[in-house]
Amino acid sequence: MINVSVNGYGTIGKRVADAIVQQPDMKLIGVSKTKPNHEAKTAVDKKYPLYVVKGAEESFSGVGFEVEGTIEEMIENSDIVVDATPSGVGFENSKLYKKFEVPAIVQGGEKEDSVECSFNARANFETSVGKKLVRVVSCNSTGIARLLTPIEERYGIDRARVTLIRRGADPGQPSKGPINDVILDPVYLPSHHGPDVKSVLPNINIDTLALKIPTTLMHVHVVNLSLNKSADKVRMCELLSKESRIHMVALREGIKGIAGLKELALDVGRPRGDLWENCVWEESISVEDKEVYLFQAIHQEADVVPENIDAIRAIMDECSCKESMDLTDRTIGMGLGR
């Protein structure tokens, strides 16, 4: 049994904690919060042991939240930590993990050169075995790596060009994002996503551009691939359909946009309306000889959750990539209409 703690119980942390308790080979030691807000109450209601910054115990107990101990105590009792704190904080926290000699996973907001390696389950699971500090790449990079890996394995990719149409902010971030604008993010090429994908797929020749638009729902990617071998639409659809973390949006579903995908997630009872899968519109796939075009959507709050679970097993050297992905997918309920 792997004893896991989650440092930071926010957008990603609360989802990862929920996934950990579903794993038969993991035990959730606890979660941490810096403020006694509604997310802290959710953790308490779920009976997740709550740990806080040293000296903040009274601010939590004063509003009726039972505190298990300090963050340092949580780390000391863990085999591994998933750090889901805001960008930049994870790197600062890594000094604490090193002090207690506990391996840790940080999120895509941390810099590539601040960790031993970057992680995507489908692309480079084995690279993280035995490492002490691993970064799960960002939501967009996770989605791109999932898509490109099987295509690279089957056909080889000469060049990938991806335009990212990004949500302006997460639903719980009303102070962020454009209100009535489309922002070039950044103006120059490439955006940071291309280099980020190369941190897990170093041999991929990829260019990325990014725009921010006034929505909070999901990201959309416009993908163009130049392959090394000829392909056709039927075989491309068959290839992607076999990937457990890619949902092929069929024409019969009548879903033309991201609002429909979120509605689908809610209709099938997904917690928080989460979509852990890449959603690739089958109708959008166009293949002409060695050129491929398609649209896919990525739920920024959810797609890295299974990757964090797999990263735990990779670092602890518990099982193979396939065994881990199969177990993660089965326990969290991966697959829309499978």
Image (cartoon, rainbow, N blue to C red):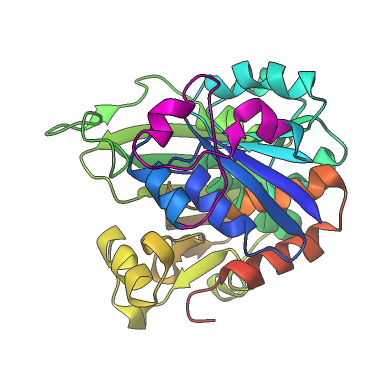
Residue 246 seen: yes
Residue 227 seen: no
Give whichever of 174, 141 is nearer the camera: 174
Q: Quadrant of the N terminus?
A: bottom right
The residue that appears at 68% across and 58% down in the rendered structure is 150
Q: How many marks?
A: 0
Q: Quadrant of residue 327?
A: bottom right
Q: Magenta stretch containing residue 61, yes or no?
A: yes
Which range of residues does the magenta coloring cover? 46-75
**Residue 91 locus on image (x, y percent):** 62, 19
Residue 18 relative to residue 211: left or right: right
When the figure is inspected, residue 296 is found, relative to residue 160, above or below; the finding is: below
The residue that appears at 29% across and 69% down in the rendered structure is 263
The residue that appears at 29% across and 34% down in the rendered structure is 212
Give whichever of 98, 55 is nearer the camera: 55
When the figure is inspected, residue 75 is found, relative to residue 30, above or below; the finding is: above
Q: Quadrant of the C terminus?
A: bottom right
Residue 329 relative to residue 302: left or right: right
Give whichever of 66, 280 is nearer the camera: 66
Q: Magenta stretch containing residue 101, yes or no?
A: no
**Residue 66 locus on image (x, y percent):** 48, 43
Give whichever of 123, 69 is nearer the camera: 69
**Residue 86 locus on image (x, y percent):** 47, 27
When the figure is inspected, residue 121 is found, relative to residue 261, above or below; the finding is: above
Q: In which quarter of the image is residue 130?
A: top right
The residue that appears at 40% across and 19% down in the rendered structure is 188
**Residue 316 locus on image (x, y percent):** 84, 45
Residue 120 relative to residue 90: left or right: right
